[in-house]
Amino acid sequence: MAYTFKQCFLPSNKYSIKAPFIMTPKFITVHNTANDKPAANEISYMISNNNQVSYHIAVDDKEVIQAIPFNRNAWHCGDGGGSTDPNALKKGNRLSIGIEICYSKSGGVRYGVAEENAVQYIAVLLKQFGWGIDRVKKHQDWNGKYCPHRILSEDRWGRFLKRIEEAMKPKDSEKPTEKDDDAMKFTNETTKAAVHDYIQQAVDKKLIDKSWLEKFDKGTMTSGDFEGLKIIIAQRSA
Ligand SMILES: [Zn+2]
């Protein structure tokens, strides 16, 4: 993970201004800050002022900072008091987790890294909530505001969602090395010879048909075949 996750919570005596309602989140709303401040400043400014403007998360090129618990609402969608009815149009402020991506005014590398951190963090959140990509909204979806401005002006919203979907997939290192229907591969000849001998002995003992050895020698035996074969050999030699 390329970012550090931190929490710097809004004091509860400001809940009445910035997070008045209990919320069961249903969506994630993506924003660009439209300035060049780091996440820590974005959060400290939000906490210190008394405007009805708030968001749960700010992300920059180094940190993901949470300021409001996800079970409280925040004012970031411009759709007012809205509704908690999932079928209502205006529900961003009442049902969504607000994520601000920093450095969007000037863009550049640090913005690019901040955006990638947001991609990775949103993927984590979706997995935690058991949600699909359809839960990720842009600010524009709620009230028409041109936000996240940089992603929109560079016409990358679709690609942004695709990157989140990619980030949700298990990494190569988490995948099994061989699929059942792939031909067996051996990293060294000793292992290959040992498996050959194992199959040869089973054929000699008439536990399995000799066609299995031919298949192995031709290199067409799959991992699934071999797993099945081991079960048969174990059963028949018992
Ligand atoms: Zn916005």
Image (cartoon, helix red, strand yellow):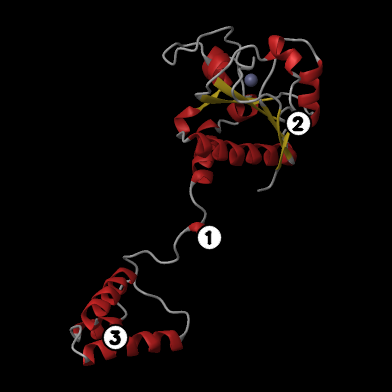
Query: How far across and how far down the image is residue 25, in percent?
Result: 53, 23
Q: Judge by depth and name the residue closer to the eye, 66 or 178.
A: 66
User: Which residue is rendered at x = 68% and y = 39% of the image?
Assistant: 112
Label 2 – label 1 distance at C-alpha: 31 Å
Numbered mark located on residue 133 in the image = none
Check disc 3 and report its element: helix, strand or loop: helix
Q: Disc 2, disc 3: CB below 8 Å? A: no
Is 37 displayed left or right of 215 in the figure? right
Q: Residues within 10 Å of mark 1 (few under 14, many from 20)?
A: few
Query: How far across and how far down the image is residue 73, in percent?
Result: 61, 17
Q: Judge by depth and name the residue closer to the eye, 233 or 140.
A: 233
Q: Residues within 10 Å of mark 3 (few under 14, many from 20)?
A: many
For badge 1, the amino acid type reads Ser
Mark found first going from the N terminus, 3 or 1: 1
Question: Residue reaching furthest front?
Answer: 238
**Mark 2 or 3: the one toward you:** 3
The part of the image, by quadrant, that contains residue 144 is top right
- The residue indicated by pointer 1 is 173
- The residue indicated by pointer 2 is 39
The part of the image, by quadrant, that contains residue 71 is top right
User: Which residue is rendered at x = 81% and y = 27% of the image?
Assistant: 41
- The residue indicated by pointer 3 is 199
For badge 3, the amino acid type reads Ile
Mark found first going from the N terminus, 2 or 3: 2
In this view, 64 is above or below 82? below
